[in-house]
Image: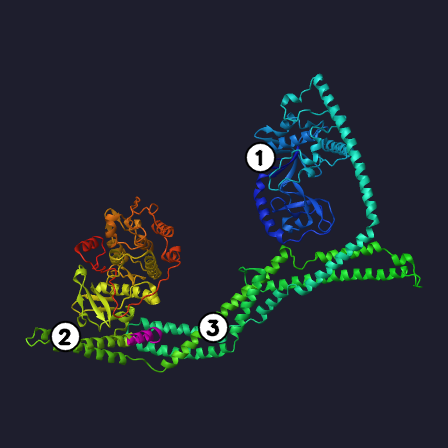
Amino acid sequence: QVEDVVGCHIEDAVTFWAQNVSRCNDLLKLSCALAEACPRANAVFGKPDFSKIYGGCFSEDGCWYRCKVQQVISNEKAGTCQVLYIDYGNSEVLSRSDIVEIPPNLQCPSVAKKYRLWGLQIPTDQNLNMFDQGKKFLSSLVFEKEIKIRHKAKHKDGTVIAQAEYEKTDIGEEVAKAGFAEKCTSPGNTEVVEERKVDVMQNQHRKINVSVPLWVNRSDHALYSIPGGHFDQVAASASNQNFAGNRMFAPKEKMLVSTSVPDSSLAQVRPDQKLSEEKEVLRRDNVNLLQRQKELELKEKEASRKAAESFEETLHTYIGTKMRSLAAKVKALKEMRHTNKNSCFGEQLSQAIEVVTEGCLTVPCSLEKLQKVWTEYDLAQERIRLCRNVDERDELITKRDEVQHNLYSAVEELILEVDQLPLPERSRTLQELSASLEMVYGQGSEVDNSEEVFQQFFKWKGVKMKKLICVRNDTDTALQILSDWFSGILKCFDLMSEASSDLEEVVGNVDEILKKVELAICEELDTDLNEHDEAEKGIIMSAYNQVIHNVRQEQSMITVIQNRYLASVEFKKQAEEWLNRRPDINNLVSVKKTLKSLKAQLRWKLVEKNNFEESDDYSEFEMAGIKEEIADLRNRVLQEISKEQEEYEKLMYLTQKWFPELPLLYPEAGILNYMNSGGLLTRSLERDLLDAEPMKELSTKRPLVCSEIQGQKVLLKGYSVDVSSEAKVIERVAKYHRAYDQQKEKSGLLQLLFLLFCKASDPLVYLMVPYYPGASLGALQADTPLTLEEALKVMKGVAQGLQTLHGANIVHGSLHGNNVFAVNRKQGIVGDFDFTKSEEQRAAANTMVVGTLSLVSPELKMGQPASPASDMYAYGWPPFLGEKEANVMHYVSFNLQLCVQNQEFGIKEDGTPEVDVVVMDDKVKSLLQNLFCCNRLTAEQVLKDDCFLVVDTIPVSPQPGEELEPHEEHDSEKTDEKRRQLTEEGGANPAQ
């Protein structure tokens, strides 16, 4: 038979273990199966079966491998056994706890086989050094190499006698040539010769009387071999260092002097002269060994004498020592029992299981019904909302009303049922339970929902307690026997006692009694309820994880019930008002009529004023009266517009919450248009009715007028729209306004007041915003620059504005110093932008260039779309300019303007500034560097930067009579033509 194998372990110069190359997949499957089965398997107890295959945990890597027990070294509970790893050939000594039973399907034949080189044997006179050299030599030929094996014979122990070849090299011949083995007279007698050799070596070791590893015994030299195939070369160790240079030999055999690997010439007969020299060396070695033997014998006698003296001394104090030891153990046992009595083994987890199983709340029966009806109600409302057919409208409304009544009944039913449940108390109990368990067991992990783990836990706890009770009973029985013995022995030594008793019967076997007491106490002391093996820990943690899973599941259910309960209470409260009646727009119509009348009066007064100004009978006194009447009419119109807004807000709420049919029932009211604009659109307010003053110096590209409403200065920005662009403008304005409306003044955004249309013939829409004259960052820095503290406060507000926009998925796209405002030099506000343009169009228009510098982010230059990151780049652009360009930068950048004024700096290839060379505060420099890099900070991260930790941004609302300032589109007040030209060139013209 011929097979290909890979060497995995070397025993000696002619014996090795190897694995068939075709069984590599079997090894992989075995490893996976053992890794899964062994950690949960039972450890070997009692006398192991030497013919059975077990699982052994290899000491070097902690992995599991198949093994057979070769020898029981210690029979104690925590004893040790010598095992052979049958799939690799190496062996080691393992604790019983590391040897486990494995399933029958893993009891298959070994993967590795033991091979002996055909026709070779180890010389009986070979010393340990030569033995190790031979082992190394064979390892270099076969270990982890694919070799070809030709079977010749087979021993009774399963060892295969074979001829081995590696790359057409006969391994046996190489070993023989190297002098590590010799030819057998008869290959079949190899086993007999090896046995004789073992006997000779054992006799030599007995004479020396020193524990030297027997190289002929495979197990003594394989203790450090790794099952996975790694082999630690055997070298001269500390245990045999006293024999370095000495050689073991037999009197009838010759041996090789050299320990190196010789060539083929060393196998020839040596000359007589060389042989005589070898004999002399051997003679000297023999003399040294005999001398060493005598020294060891003397040491042994001395050790025996000392041991006898120590034993004699121990005998004198044996009884006292024994009783003191026993008393100390009894004391420790009392303390342990007291501690365990107070700890209540597993009681906390047992109570937790009872809480989550027996006290668990169930889902109210009415909840499922309510959810079903509520879903049906939402669907009915949505159908009405999407309906555009007047004929279908009434039918859908009737169906909705029917479902609404059903929902009202279901809500009442749920409220009554939930009121009977102790939801707050139960939620608090579960929260306290979860917190107390997590303090003991830590965070729970996800598990599959299974109640079997509870049964397994209680079963394990019962077995554990039963074992503990049994152990305690044994201890109590043993101690009672000892107590009875002491009572009996007292009578023997009581001279006053007349009771006669047999001394042999009274004394009895006291040594056996003491031994049983000590063993019983030690066993109970070793039975620690708080120490668990891996299997027990698994049971406990599984039960704990299941408890936490049930707790979270019930808490989630309670949250759902509570949320639905609160929604039901709110629904019932509001539904009672509208359940049997319908809203109308009578109030809105009334307000609109009043508005129409007031606007007509206002127009007539305006015409009267214009005519009177051109009249020959002009009088200042009469003109003042007319102006007062006009101002009063304007105020009344604005008041009525506020009432109109309130009515629209009510109708919008009713449309969204209860009656989506209102826009269908009253299309003339324009409810949908109001909703789509976010509450900004009004058709009752017209530009002609306001006392508007055109701002020609800022109106280079679009109409821009200034007015005053109720004591607040405002700007009206005119946008030219057509039918296709009107909806898009309204959508962008509404999105911006909703972002502002969530936080109001704390949003960091410019407030939008109204969106109003001109006459039908005029394709203009006006956006009304607050007017902040002189408060833009560019204007402030040109006039009275901010201090560092003021600049930080302002820039924190700007960062808040950008965070609000980016959180609403809005990219500003045209951020610069003229649409950022410092209200009262404290609060930073981000201005609006051109709502007729998309964010890409705004970013493309914002191509501000100063000299050779471009203030556009690198990614925008490369054609990438505008993004929050490009906004943050614009936010970080400070005036890194010298004196020549400092005045220009006041109009195009805004960030921390005082930090680097009048400093020269470098520009990188991508156009970003060299911040490192500028002298400024370290925190500010760090912030700017993080705004110019590729991976820029977000607005949220900027707000958390160290620069702004001590900055308190105070919201400032515009007050009547207070000077306010234009935003981004209109720029600050321009005082000369040069500034206007620079602004237009930079793409930040207010009329864009």
Q: Is residue 541 above or below residue 225?
A: below
User: Residue 946 location in percent, x, y?
Assistant: 40, 55
Question: Mark 3 to mark 2: distance in Å?
Answer: 61 Å
- Prevalent SS, magenta region: helix
Q: Nearer the viewer, residue 503 or 953?
A: 953
* Other-residue count near label 3 (Cα within 10 Å), few / some / many at <14 / 14–19 / ≥20: some
Q: Is residue 982 above or below residue 112?
A: below
Q: Does 651 appear in magenta?
A: yes
Disc nearer the start of the sequence (3/2): 3
* The image quarter in which residue 351 lies: bottom right
User: Residue 703 location in percent, x, y?
Assistant: 18, 63
Disc nearer the start of the sequence (1/2): 1
* Other-residue count near label 2 (Cα within 10 Å), few / some / many at <14 / 14–19 / ≥20: some
Tag of residue 145: 1
Comparing marks 1 and 3, which lies closer to the viewer? Answer: 3
Question: Mark 1 to mark 2: distance in Å?
Answer: 109 Å
Task: Say which quadrant the C terminus sits in.
Answer: bottom left
Q: Nearer the viewer, residue 115 or 149?
A: 115
Dot 2 amino acid type: Leu
Disc 1 element: loop
Q: Which residue is mark 2?
A: 606
Dots 1, 3 in contact, CB < 8 A: no
User: Residue 69 location in percent, x, y?
Assistant: 70, 45
Q: Which residue is mark 3?
A: 562
Residue at the extreme left of the image, as rendered = 616
Image check: 549 left or right of 677? right
Dot 1 amino acid type: Lys
Task: Say which quadrant the N terminus sits in.
Answer: top right
Comparing marks 3 and 2, which lies closer to the viewer? Answer: 2
Q: Which residues are magenta?
A: 646-662
* Residue 230 in view (yes/no): yes
User: Residue 721 location in percent, x, y?
Assistant: 20, 63
